[in-house]
């Protein structure tokens, strides 16, 4: 799922689509009830409700990978300690954290190689359903007037989630809009993603 948001220009836009299914028939005192019988025989659509909101913790996060090699945007679920060590070694020299893979999973989100700094990948929330967990990831890009570094970047984030259910991902694309800077202004006016924002998403 992708949507582009201009943070400085518009407010939140919520579109709700409701679908109503009705049966049509002509009824009299002794009229036909075939349409009703057909509708009653159709299986009801059962929604998959959210069971709970899962907590998660950031393990490793940076704008550049270990050797500055080019990467592709993607999401990966890591299920074993050996895989965790192997994957982490491609991105960082940090020591792997202690993870209980009998009840936890490590999720890697990468934004791929970008032409400059100012790009951020952030896990915003994780929701548990009956047979799956949906992780929401926000991909933030700098606007035209944002001050960034000129070096190529490879934003990534490792998080740990308390679940062993299959994990699905949904992504949201956000553009940070910055005001044009005066010649003597050196600081960017980007609005960072706050830690409390991701837990309340």
Image (tube, rainbow, N blue to C red):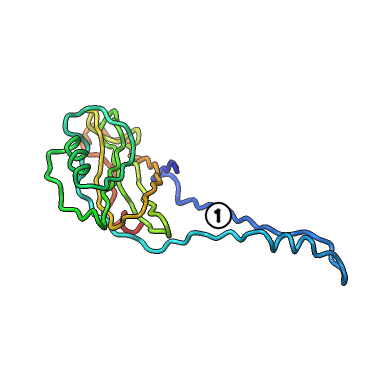
Q: Position of residue 144 (x, y in %)?
A: 35, 32
Residue identified by numbered label 1: 16
The C terminus: image quadrant: bottom left
Camera-side residue: 159 or 165? 165
Quarter of the view holding residue 34: bottom right
- Identify the residue shown where x is 22% and y is 51%: 58
When the figure is inspected, residue 35 is found, relative to residue 81, above or below; the finding is below
Quarter of the view holding residue 117: top left
Quarter of the view holding residue 27: bottom right
- Identify the residue shown where x is 29% and y is 38%: 110
Report crowding for label 1: few under 14, some 14 to 19, many 20 or more residues within 10 A (C-alpha). few
When the figure is inspected, residue 194 is found, relative to residue 49, above or below; the finding is above
The residue lying furthest to the bottom in this view is 29
Camera-side residue: 40 or 189? 40
In the image: residue 93, left or right of residue 71:
left
- Identify the residue shown where x is 26% and y is 30%: 116
Callout 1: SS: loop
Q: Position of residue 65 (x, y in %)?
A: 20, 34
* Tally of numbered tags: 1
Q: Position of residue 80 (x, y in %)?
A: 23, 47
In the image: residue 14, left or right of residue 56:
right
The N terminus: image quadrant: top left
- Identify the residue shown where x is 33% and y is 41%: 75
Camera-side residue: 133 or 7? 133
Q: Position of residue 166 (x, y in %)?
A: 37, 51
């Amino acid at each position: 799922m992708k949507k582009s948001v201009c943070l400085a220009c518009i407010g939140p836009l919520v579109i709700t689509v409701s679908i109503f299914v009705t049966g049509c028939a002509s009824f009299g005192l002794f009229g036909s009830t075939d349409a009703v019988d057909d509708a009653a025989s159709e299986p009801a659509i059962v929604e998959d409700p959210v069971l709970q909101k899962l907590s998660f913790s950031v393990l490793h996060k940076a704008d550049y990978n270990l050797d500055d090699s080019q990467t592709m945007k993607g999401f990966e679920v890591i299920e074993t300690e050996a895989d965790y060590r192997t994957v982490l070694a491609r991105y960082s020299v940090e020591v792997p954290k202690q993870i209980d893979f009998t009840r936890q999973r490590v999720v890697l989100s990468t934004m791929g190689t970008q032409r400059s700094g100012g790009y951020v990948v952030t896990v915003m929330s994780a929701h548990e359903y009956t047979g799956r967990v949906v992780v929401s990831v926000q991909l933030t890009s700098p606007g035209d007037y944002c001050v960034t570094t000129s070096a190529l970047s490879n934003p990534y984030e490792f998080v740990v989630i308390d679940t062993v259910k299959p994990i699905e991902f949904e992504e949201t694309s956000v553009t940070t809009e910055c005001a044009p800077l005066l010649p003597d202004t050196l600081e960017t006016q980007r609005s960072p993603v706050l830690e409390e924002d991701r837990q309340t998403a």
